[in-house]
Image (cartoon, rainbow, N blue to C red):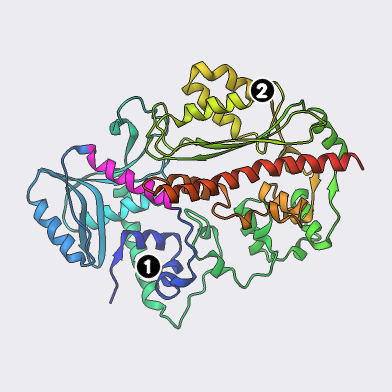
Amino acid sequence: MNENLSKSKYCKGIQCKKILWLDKYKPDEKVDTARKSALENGSRIGILAKGLFAKYEDIPYSEDLSLMIKKTNELLKDKPNIITEASFGYNHNFCSVDILKNDIDGVEIYEVKSSSDISQIYYDDVFYQYYVLTNLGLNVKKASIVYINKNYIRHGALDIHKLFNIEDVTDLAKSNLPNIKNNIDDINNFINKYNKDNEPEVPLSISCFEPYLCSYWQYCTKALPKPNVFDIAKMKTINKLKYYNLGLIRFDDFKNTDINPKYLEQINFELENLEPKINKEAIKNLMDSLKYPLYFIDYETFQLAVPEYEGTKPYQQLPFQYSLHIIRDEDAKTIEHKEFLAQIDDKDFLRHFAQSMIKDIPDNGSVIIYNNSFEPSRNRELARMFPDLADELNRINSQIVDFLVPFRRRDYYMKEFEGSYSIKKVLPALYPDDSELDYHSLPVVHNGEEASDTFLSLKGKSKEEQETLRNGLLVYCKLDTLAMVKICEKFKEILNK
Protein backbone atom coordinates (compact mmCIF):
# COMPACT_ATOMS: atom_id res chain seq x y z
CA MET A 1 0.00 0.00 0.00
CA ASN A 2 1.30 3.43 -0.92
CA GLU A 3 2.37 5.82 1.82
CA ASN A 4 1.00 9.33 1.94
CA LEU A 5 3.00 11.46 -0.47
CA SER A 6 3.18 15.11 0.56
CA LYS A 7 4.20 17.90 -1.78
CA SER A 8 7.55 18.22 0.04
CA LYS A 9 8.20 14.49 -0.46
CA TYR A 10 7.10 14.79 -4.05
CA CYS A 11 9.57 17.61 -4.67
CA LYS A 12 12.37 15.63 -2.98
CA GLY A 13 11.49 12.69 -5.20
CA ILE A 14 11.70 14.91 -8.26
CA GLN A 15 15.23 15.89 -7.24
CA CYS A 16 16.35 12.37 -6.29
CA LYS A 17 14.14 9.51 -5.16
CA LYS A 18 16.92 8.12 -2.96
CA ILE A 19 16.50 11.15 -0.66
CA LEU A 20 13.13 9.68 0.40
CA TRP A 21 14.78 6.34 1.26
CA LEU A 22 17.56 8.09 3.17
CA ASP A 23 15.08 10.27 5.07
CA LYS A 24 13.26 7.14 6.17
CA TYR A 25 16.12 4.75 6.93
CA LYS A 26 19.29 6.87 7.35
CA PRO A 27 18.14 10.22 8.81
CA ASP A 28 21.20 10.43 11.09
CA GLU A 29 23.40 10.71 8.00
CA LYS A 30 21.78 13.97 7.02
CA VAL A 31 23.92 17.10 7.15
CA ASP A 32 21.46 19.94 7.48
CA THR A 33 22.82 23.08 5.82
CA ALA A 34 19.71 25.22 6.34
CA ARG A 35 20.54 28.43 8.18
CA LYS A 36 18.33 29.66 10.98
CA SER A 37 18.11 33.10 9.37
CA ALA A 38 16.94 31.56 6.07
CA LEU A 39 14.21 29.62 7.88
CA GLU A 40 13.14 32.78 9.71
CA ASN A 41 13.06 34.71 6.43
CA GLY A 42 10.84 32.03 4.91
CA SER A 43 8.49 32.05 7.88
CA ARG A 44 8.19 35.85 7.83
CA ILE A 45 7.46 35.85 4.09
CA GLY A 46 4.80 33.18 4.49
CA ILE A 47 2.99 35.13 7.19
CA LEU A 48 3.09 38.40 5.24
CA ALA A 49 1.88 36.83 1.99
CA LYS A 50 -1.22 35.52 3.74
CA GLY A 51 -2.37 39.13 3.94
CA LEU A 52 -2.29 39.69 0.16
CA PHE A 53 -6.02 39.03 -0.12
CA ALA A 54 -7.07 40.70 3.13
CA LYS A 55 -8.95 38.61 5.72
CA TYR A 56 -8.14 34.89 5.76
CA GLU A 57 -8.80 31.79 7.84
CA ASP A 58 -5.84 29.56 8.66
CA ILE A 59 -5.89 25.77 8.93
CA PRO A 60 -3.81 24.86 12.01
CA TYR A 61 -1.23 22.12 11.53
CA SER A 62 -2.03 18.69 12.93
CA GLU A 63 -0.12 15.41 12.73
CA ASP A 64 -3.52 13.92 12.00
CA LEU A 65 -3.85 15.14 8.41
CA SER A 66 -7.50 14.14 8.28
CA LEU A 67 -8.31 16.90 10.77
CA MET A 68 -6.74 19.50 8.46
CA ILE A 69 -8.64 18.10 5.48
CA LYS A 70 -11.92 18.06 7.44
CA LYS A 71 -11.49 21.70 8.54
CA THR A 72 -10.65 22.70 4.94
CA ASN A 73 -13.78 21.01 3.58
CA GLU A 74 -15.90 22.89 6.11
CA LEU A 75 -14.41 26.24 5.06
CA LEU A 76 -14.74 25.43 1.35
CA LYS A 77 -18.51 25.51 1.80
CA ASP A 78 -18.36 29.07 3.15
CA LYS A 79 -17.39 30.69 -0.15
CA PRO A 80 -16.17 33.22 -1.10
CA ASN A 81 -13.28 33.26 1.36
CA ILE A 82 -9.52 32.98 1.69
CA ILE A 83 -8.09 29.83 3.29
CA THR A 84 -4.41 29.53 4.18
CA GLU A 85 -2.78 26.11 4.55
CA ALA A 86 -5.91 24.61 2.94
CA SER A 87 -5.28 20.86 3.02
CA PHE A 88 -6.33 18.15 0.59
CA GLY A 89 -5.88 14.42 0.16
CA TYR A 90 -6.35 12.39 -3.01
CA ASN A 91 -5.34 8.76 -3.46
CA HIS A 92 -2.60 8.98 -0.78
CA ASN A 93 -1.37 12.33 -2.17
CA PHE A 94 -1.52 15.16 0.34
CA CYS A 95 -0.86 18.87 -0.01
CA SER A 96 -1.43 22.08 1.89
CA VAL A 97 -1.94 25.18 -0.27
CA ASP A 98 -0.25 28.29 1.08
CA ILE A 99 -3.12 30.54 -0.02
CA LEU A 100 -6.38 29.27 -1.51
CA LYS A 101 -8.73 31.87 -2.94
CA ASN A 102 -12.09 30.15 -2.69
CA ASP A 103 -14.54 31.82 -5.10
CA ILE A 104 -18.13 31.00 -6.00
CA ASP A 105 -17.08 29.51 -9.37
CA GLY A 106 -13.82 27.81 -8.37
CA VAL A 107 -10.52 28.21 -6.55
CA GLU A 108 -7.14 29.82 -7.10
CA ILE A 109 -3.83 28.39 -5.82
CA TYR A 110 -1.06 30.70 -4.60
CA GLU A 111 2.24 29.03 -3.66
CA VAL A 112 4.49 31.39 -1.67
CA LYS A 113 8.27 31.34 -2.00
CA SER A 114 10.83 33.47 -0.17
CA SER A 115 13.14 33.56 -3.20
CA SER A 116 13.49 36.51 -5.57
CA ASP A 117 13.59 34.18 -8.59
CA ILE A 118 11.54 31.20 -9.75
CA SER A 119 13.23 27.82 -10.17
CA GLN A 120 11.88 24.67 -11.78
CA ILE A 121 11.23 23.00 -8.44
CA TYR A 122 8.76 25.77 -7.58
CA TYR A 123 6.78 24.91 -10.70
CA ASP A 124 6.84 21.23 -9.70
CA ASP A 125 5.47 22.21 -6.29
CA VAL A 126 2.50 24.06 -7.80
CA PHE A 127 1.87 21.42 -10.46
CA TYR A 128 1.53 18.77 -7.75
CA GLN A 129 -1.05 20.88 -5.91
CA TYR A 130 -2.92 21.48 -9.16
CA TYR A 131 -2.99 17.71 -9.78
CA VAL A 132 -4.40 16.93 -6.33
CA LEU A 133 -7.09 19.61 -6.39
CA THR A 134 -8.28 18.96 -9.94
CA ASN A 135 -8.51 15.23 -9.28
CA LEU A 136 -10.72 16.02 -6.30
CA GLY A 137 -13.11 17.72 -8.72
CA LEU A 138 -12.29 21.31 -7.80
CA ASN A 139 -12.35 23.89 -10.57
CA VAL A 140 -8.84 25.36 -10.29
CA LYS A 141 -9.24 28.62 -12.20
CA LYS A 142 -5.72 29.80 -11.55
CA ALA A 143 -2.40 28.54 -10.16
CA SER A 144 0.29 31.07 -9.29
CA ILE A 145 3.68 31.43 -7.65
CA VAL A 146 4.15 34.33 -5.22
CA TYR A 147 7.76 35.40 -4.84
CA ILE A 148 9.90 38.35 -3.78
CA ASN A 149 10.22 41.46 -5.93
CA LYS A 150 13.96 42.11 -5.67
CA ASN A 151 13.53 45.64 -7.09
CA TYR A 152 11.21 46.81 -4.33
CA ILE A 153 12.73 49.59 -2.22
CA ARG A 154 11.00 50.28 1.05
CA HIS A 155 9.87 53.84 1.64
CA GLY A 156 7.72 54.34 4.70
CA ALA A 157 5.34 51.54 5.66
CA LEU A 158 5.90 48.12 4.14
CA ASP A 159 3.80 47.64 1.00
CA ILE A 160 3.28 43.89 0.62
CA HIS A 161 1.64 44.34 -2.78
CA LYS A 162 4.90 45.82 -4.05
CA LEU A 163 7.04 43.37 -2.06
CA PHE A 164 5.63 40.37 -3.96
CA ASN A 165 5.50 39.36 -7.59
CA ILE A 166 2.79 36.92 -8.70
CA GLU A 167 3.34 34.69 -11.74
CA ASP A 168 0.40 32.84 -13.29
CA VAL A 169 1.45 29.27 -14.16
CA THR A 170 -2.02 27.82 -14.83
CA ASP A 171 -1.39 26.85 -18.45
CA LEU A 172 1.86 25.14 -17.51
CA ALA A 173 0.12 23.26 -14.71
CA LYS A 174 -2.58 22.01 -17.10
CA SER A 175 -0.07 20.83 -19.68
CA ASN A 176 1.97 19.02 -17.03
CA LEU A 177 -0.86 16.97 -15.53
CA PRO A 178 0.20 13.72 -17.29
CA ASN A 179 3.79 14.22 -16.13
CA ILE A 180 2.69 14.65 -12.51
CA LYS A 181 0.80 11.34 -12.61
CA ASN A 182 3.87 9.59 -14.08
CA ASN A 183 6.16 11.16 -11.49
CA ILE A 184 3.89 10.08 -8.63
CA ASP A 185 3.77 6.52 -9.96
CA ASP A 186 7.57 6.43 -10.33
CA ILE A 187 8.10 7.74 -6.79
CA ASN A 188 5.60 5.29 -5.28
CA ASN A 189 7.10 2.36 -7.18
CA PHE A 190 10.53 3.33 -5.90
CA ILE A 191 9.33 3.64 -2.29
CA ASN A 192 7.61 0.24 -2.47
CA LYS A 193 10.60 -1.45 -4.10
CA TYR A 194 13.25 -0.62 -1.50
CA ASN A 195 13.12 -1.46 2.20
CA LYS A 196 15.50 -0.92 5.11
CA ASP A 197 17.75 -3.81 4.07
CA ASN A 198 17.72 -2.98 0.37
CA GLU A 199 19.51 0.31 -0.24
CA PRO A 200 18.97 1.69 -3.74
CA GLU A 201 22.02 2.38 -5.88
CA VAL A 202 21.59 5.78 -7.47
CA PRO A 203 24.51 7.26 -9.44
CA LEU A 204 25.85 10.71 -8.64
CA SER A 205 24.31 13.32 -10.92
CA ILE A 206 23.40 16.96 -11.17
CA SER A 207 20.48 16.08 -8.84
CA CYS A 208 23.03 15.92 -6.02
CA PHE A 209 23.42 19.69 -6.41
CA GLU A 210 20.24 21.05 -7.99
CA PRO A 211 17.85 22.51 -7.12
CA TYR A 212 19.51 22.17 -3.69
CA LEU A 213 22.76 20.67 -2.48
CA CYS A 214 21.68 17.29 -1.15
CA SER A 215 21.96 16.90 2.62
CA TYR A 216 23.23 13.35 2.05
CA TRP A 217 26.15 14.29 -0.20
CA GLN A 218 28.74 13.23 2.37
CA TYR A 219 27.01 9.89 2.86
CA CYS A 220 26.70 9.13 -0.85
CA THR A 221 30.36 10.05 -1.55
CA LYS A 222 31.96 8.48 1.53
CA ALA A 223 33.61 5.75 -0.57
CA LEU A 224 35.30 8.19 -2.95
CA PRO A 225 39.08 8.59 -2.61
CA LYS A 226 40.47 11.83 -1.24
CA PRO A 227 41.20 14.11 -2.96
CA ASN A 228 38.85 13.52 -5.87
CA VAL A 229 37.40 15.35 -8.85
CA PHE A 230 34.80 17.06 -6.64
CA ASP A 231 37.65 18.71 -4.71
CA ILE A 232 38.86 20.61 -7.77
CA ALA A 233 38.21 24.25 -6.92
CA LYS A 234 36.26 26.60 -9.18
CA MET A 235 35.38 23.90 -11.72
CA LYS A 236 31.74 23.88 -12.80
CA THR A 237 29.74 21.08 -11.20
CA ILE A 238 28.53 19.82 -14.57
CA ASN A 239 32.17 19.39 -15.67
CA LYS A 240 33.10 17.57 -12.46
CA LEU A 241 30.26 15.13 -13.13
CA LYS A 242 31.39 14.71 -16.74
CA TYR A 243 34.89 13.71 -15.62
CA TYR A 244 33.48 11.51 -12.86
CA ASN A 245 31.33 9.62 -15.36
CA LEU A 246 34.38 9.16 -17.60
CA GLY A 247 36.14 7.46 -14.69
CA LEU A 248 38.43 10.41 -13.94
CA ILE A 249 37.99 10.47 -10.18
CA ARG A 250 41.34 10.48 -8.39
CA PHE A 251 43.74 13.37 -8.90
CA ASP A 252 46.14 10.81 -10.38
CA ASP A 253 43.62 10.13 -13.15
CA PHE A 254 44.14 13.63 -14.55
CA LYS A 255 47.90 13.47 -15.06
CA ASN A 256 47.85 13.03 -18.83
CA THR A 257 44.53 14.65 -19.66
CA ASP A 258 43.72 17.80 -21.58
CA ILE A 259 42.32 19.75 -18.65
CA ASN A 260 42.29 23.48 -17.97
CA PRO A 261 45.80 24.47 -16.72
CA LYS A 262 44.46 26.13 -13.57
CA TYR A 263 42.82 22.86 -12.50
CA LEU A 264 45.90 20.88 -13.45
CA GLU A 265 48.01 23.27 -11.39
CA GLN A 266 46.01 22.52 -8.24
CA ILE A 267 46.22 18.78 -8.97
CA ASN A 268 49.97 18.84 -9.59
CA PHE A 269 50.72 20.93 -6.52
CA GLU A 270 48.88 18.50 -4.29
CA LEU A 271 50.13 15.31 -5.96
CA GLU A 272 53.75 16.38 -6.22
CA ASN A 273 53.85 18.38 -2.98
CA LEU A 274 55.32 21.31 -4.91
CA GLU A 275 56.98 24.33 -3.33
CA PRO A 276 55.07 27.64 -3.29
CA LYS A 277 54.85 29.56 -6.57
CA ILE A 278 55.59 33.26 -6.07
CA ASN A 279 55.59 35.97 -8.73
CA LYS A 280 57.67 38.60 -6.95
CA GLU A 281 57.16 41.16 -9.71
CA ALA A 282 53.37 41.02 -9.37
CA ILE A 283 53.60 41.32 -5.59
CA LYS A 284 56.04 44.22 -5.91
CA ASN A 285 53.64 46.05 -8.24
CA LEU A 286 50.85 45.58 -5.74
CA MET A 287 52.92 46.78 -2.80
CA ASP A 288 54.27 49.76 -4.77
CA SER A 289 50.68 50.88 -5.36
CA LEU A 290 50.06 51.29 -1.62
CA LYS A 291 49.90 54.74 -0.08
CA TYR A 292 50.14 55.37 3.66
CA PRO A 293 48.29 55.34 5.89
CA LEU A 294 47.12 51.79 5.21
CA TYR A 295 43.55 50.99 6.24
CA PHE A 296 42.78 47.27 6.41
CA ILE A 297 39.00 46.92 6.59
CA ASP A 298 36.42 44.13 6.55
CA TYR A 299 32.61 44.27 6.79
CA GLU A 300 30.07 41.83 8.20
CA THR A 301 26.55 41.94 6.80
CA PHE A 302 23.16 40.31 7.08
CA GLN A 303 20.24 39.94 4.68
CA LEU A 304 16.48 40.13 5.19
CA ALA A 305 13.86 38.87 2.77
CA VAL A 306 11.53 41.56 4.06
CA PRO A 307 13.21 44.99 4.08
CA GLU A 308 12.85 46.34 7.60
CA TYR A 309 14.77 49.58 7.11
CA GLU A 310 14.00 52.69 5.12
CA GLY A 311 15.58 52.71 1.66
CA THR A 312 16.57 49.02 1.62
CA LYS A 313 15.67 46.19 -0.76
CA PRO A 314 14.86 42.52 -0.14
CA TYR A 315 18.03 40.50 0.45
CA GLN A 316 20.23 43.59 0.37
CA GLN A 317 23.54 43.00 2.15
CA LEU A 318 23.27 45.26 5.20
CA PRO A 319 26.62 46.05 6.86
CA PHE A 320 26.36 46.03 10.64
CA GLN A 321 30.03 45.73 11.61
CA TYR A 322 33.53 46.53 10.51
CA SER A 323 37.02 45.96 11.81
CA LEU A 324 39.79 48.36 10.84
CA HIS A 325 43.53 47.97 11.35
CA ILE A 326 45.59 51.07 10.58
CA ILE A 327 49.32 51.41 9.80
CA ARG A 328 50.10 55.12 9.77
CA ASP A 329 53.45 55.02 7.97
CA GLU A 330 56.17 52.65 6.82
CA ASP A 331 58.11 53.03 10.06
CA ALA A 332 55.12 52.66 12.36
CA LYS A 333 55.97 50.65 15.47
CA THR A 334 52.34 50.01 16.43
CA ILE A 335 49.20 49.05 14.58
CA GLU A 336 46.01 50.85 15.54
CA HIS A 337 42.67 49.09 15.64
CA LYS A 338 39.19 50.59 15.37
CA GLU A 339 35.85 48.88 15.07
CA PHE A 340 32.12 49.38 14.78
CA LEU A 341 29.34 47.01 15.81
CA ALA A 342 25.75 48.19 15.52
CA GLN A 343 23.21 47.91 18.28
CA ILE A 344 20.56 45.35 17.32
CA ASP A 345 17.71 47.80 18.07
CA ASP A 346 19.25 50.75 16.17
CA LYS A 347 16.92 51.49 13.24
CA ASP A 348 19.49 53.88 11.75
CA PHE A 349 22.49 51.57 12.08
CA LEU A 350 23.39 51.80 8.35
CA ARG A 351 23.92 55.55 8.58
CA HIS A 352 25.83 55.17 11.82
CA PHE A 353 28.00 52.49 10.19
CA ALA A 354 28.82 54.81 7.26
CA GLN A 355 29.48 57.84 9.47
CA SER A 356 31.77 55.86 11.77
CA MET A 357 33.76 54.48 8.87
CA ILE A 358 34.16 57.89 7.25
CA LYS A 359 35.38 59.25 10.57
CA ASP A 360 37.88 56.39 10.96
CA ILE A 361 39.20 56.71 7.36
CA PRO A 362 39.71 60.47 6.97
CA ASP A 363 42.86 60.37 4.83
CA ASN A 364 43.77 59.54 1.25
CA GLY A 365 45.72 56.41 2.08
CA SER A 366 45.09 52.92 0.70
CA VAL A 367 41.98 51.10 1.86
CA ILE A 368 42.88 47.42 1.75
CA ILE A 369 40.19 44.79 1.42
CA TYR A 370 39.99 41.13 0.44
CA ASN A 371 37.56 40.77 -2.48
CA ASN A 372 36.87 43.88 -4.53
CA SER A 373 33.29 42.85 -5.33
CA PHE A 374 31.98 43.15 -1.77
CA GLU A 375 32.86 46.24 0.29
CA PRO A 376 32.77 48.69 -2.66
CA SER A 377 29.27 47.47 -3.55
CA ARG A 378 28.10 48.07 0.02
CA ASN A 379 29.58 51.57 -0.11
CA ARG A 380 27.73 52.34 -3.34
CA GLU A 381 24.47 51.16 -1.77
CA LEU A 382 25.09 53.34 1.28
CA ALA A 383 25.88 56.29 -0.99
CA ARG A 384 22.52 55.80 -2.73
CA MET A 385 20.72 55.72 0.60
CA PHE A 386 22.57 58.68 2.13
CA PRO A 387 23.41 61.24 -0.61
CA ASP A 388 24.99 63.60 1.91
CA LEU A 389 27.63 60.91 2.62
CA ALA A 390 28.12 59.90 -1.03
CA ASP A 391 31.25 61.97 -1.71
CA GLU A 392 33.12 60.48 1.23
CA LEU A 393 31.97 56.94 0.47
CA ASN A 394 33.04 57.36 -3.16
CA ARG A 395 36.39 58.70 -1.95
CA ILE A 396 36.93 55.57 0.13
CA ASN A 397 36.04 53.42 -2.88
CA SER A 398 38.59 55.26 -4.99
CA GLN A 399 41.32 54.32 -2.49
CA ILE A 400 40.66 50.58 -2.45
CA VAL A 401 43.36 47.99 -3.07
CA ASP A 402 42.33 44.33 -3.28
CA PHE A 403 44.72 41.88 -1.59
CA LEU A 404 42.83 38.94 -3.04
CA VAL A 405 44.15 39.66 -6.55
CA PRO A 406 47.57 37.94 -6.37
CA PHE A 407 45.94 34.82 -4.93
CA ARG A 408 43.10 34.77 -7.45
CA ARG A 409 45.61 35.20 -10.31
CA ARG A 410 47.86 32.63 -8.65
CA ASP A 411 50.81 34.97 -8.56
CA TYR A 412 51.11 33.47 -5.10
CA TYR A 413 50.07 29.84 -4.81
CA MET A 414 50.64 26.98 -2.39
CA LYS A 415 49.37 23.42 -2.37
CA GLU A 416 47.64 24.12 0.96
CA PHE A 417 45.32 26.58 -0.80
CA GLU A 418 43.68 23.56 -2.51
CA GLY A 419 42.74 25.70 -5.49
CA SER A 420 40.97 28.28 -3.34
CA TYR A 421 41.84 31.91 -2.67
CA SER A 422 39.55 32.29 0.33
CA ILE A 423 41.25 34.04 3.22
CA LYS A 424 40.16 31.07 5.38
CA LYS A 425 42.46 28.90 3.23
CA VAL A 426 45.21 31.42 2.55
CA LEU A 427 45.89 32.61 6.11
CA PRO A 428 46.53 29.21 7.77
CA ALA A 429 48.68 28.19 4.80
CA LEU A 430 50.88 31.29 5.15
CA TYR A 431 51.06 30.99 8.95
CA PRO A 432 50.53 27.30 9.76
CA ASP A 433 51.97 27.46 13.28
CA ASP A 434 50.29 30.63 14.55
CA SER A 435 47.39 29.63 16.81
CA GLU A 436 46.27 33.26 17.13
CA LEU A 437 45.34 33.18 13.43
CA ASP A 438 43.21 30.04 13.69
CA TYR A 439 39.55 30.70 12.88
CA HIS A 440 38.57 27.31 14.32
CA SER A 441 39.73 28.34 17.81
CA LEU A 442 37.56 31.45 17.98
CA PRO A 443 35.05 31.38 20.86
CA VAL A 444 31.71 32.14 19.16
CA VAL A 445 31.87 33.09 15.47
CA HIS A 446 34.00 31.28 12.88
CA ASN A 447 32.74 32.52 9.49
CA GLY A 448 30.61 35.18 7.84
CA GLU A 449 27.35 33.21 7.93
CA GLU A 450 27.75 32.63 11.65
CA ALA A 451 28.47 36.33 12.12
CA SER A 452 25.22 37.27 10.37
CA ASP A 453 23.15 34.75 12.30
CA THR A 454 24.79 35.71 15.61
CA PHE A 455 24.03 39.40 15.14
CA LEU A 456 20.40 38.71 14.27
CA SER A 457 20.12 36.41 17.29
CA LEU A 458 20.87 39.33 19.64
CA LYS A 459 17.18 40.32 19.62
CA GLY A 460 15.52 39.33 22.85
CA LYS A 461 18.74 38.22 24.55
CA SER A 462 19.68 39.35 28.04
CA LYS A 463 22.38 41.98 28.49
CA GLU A 464 24.86 39.31 29.58
CA GLU A 465 24.07 37.06 26.62
CA GLN A 466 24.37 39.98 24.22
CA GLU A 467 27.73 40.92 25.67
CA THR A 468 29.09 37.40 25.08
CA LEU A 469 27.82 37.26 21.52
CA ARG A 470 28.95 40.80 20.68
CA ASN A 471 32.43 39.99 21.97
CA GLY A 472 32.47 36.92 19.74
CA LEU A 473 31.56 39.08 16.75
CA LEU A 474 34.28 41.62 17.54
CA VAL A 475 36.96 38.95 17.94
CA TYR A 476 36.00 37.28 14.66
CA CYS A 477 35.90 40.43 12.54
CA LYS A 478 39.16 41.65 14.08
CA LEU A 479 40.87 38.47 12.89
CA ASP A 480 39.68 39.12 9.33
CA THR A 481 41.55 42.44 9.18
CA LEU A 482 44.52 41.16 11.15
CA ALA A 483 44.72 38.46 8.48
CA MET A 484 45.23 41.14 5.83
CA VAL A 485 47.91 42.81 7.96
CA LYS A 486 49.70 39.46 8.20
CA ILE A 487 49.39 38.95 4.44
CA CYS A 488 50.94 42.39 3.96
CA GLU A 489 53.80 41.37 6.24
CA LYS A 490 54.27 38.20 4.23
CA PHE A 491 54.41 40.21 1.00
CA LYS A 492 57.10 42.45 2.52
CA GLU A 493 59.04 39.42 3.72
CA ILE A 494 59.02 37.95 0.20
CA LEU A 495 60.25 41.18 -1.37
CA ASN A 496 63.03 41.55 1.20
CA LYS A 497 64.50 38.11 0.48
Residue that protrudes farthest toward the bottom in the picture: 197
**Residue span colored magenta:** 36-52
Q: Is residue 331 left or right of residue 395?
A: right
Please say whether residue 419 is visible from this viewpoint: no
Between residues 382 and 177, which one lies in front from this camera angle? 382
Q: Is residue 391 left or right of residue 367?
A: left
Q: Which residue is mark 1?
A: 187
Position above or below: 204 against 396: below
Q: Which residue is mark 2?
A: 398
Badge count: 2
What main secondary structure does the magenta stretch of the protein show?
helix
Per the model, the C-alpha gap separating discs 1 and 2 is 56 Å
Position above or below: 11 against 448: below
Q: Position of residue 80 (x, y in %)?
A: 10, 43
Q: Identify the residue at image location x=23%, y=39%.
A: 51
Specify the amino acid type for callout 2.
Answer: Ser
Q: In the rendered image, which quarter contains the N terminus?
A: bottom left
Q: In the rendered image, which quarter contains the C terminus?
A: top right
Q: Secondary structure at mark 2?
A: helix
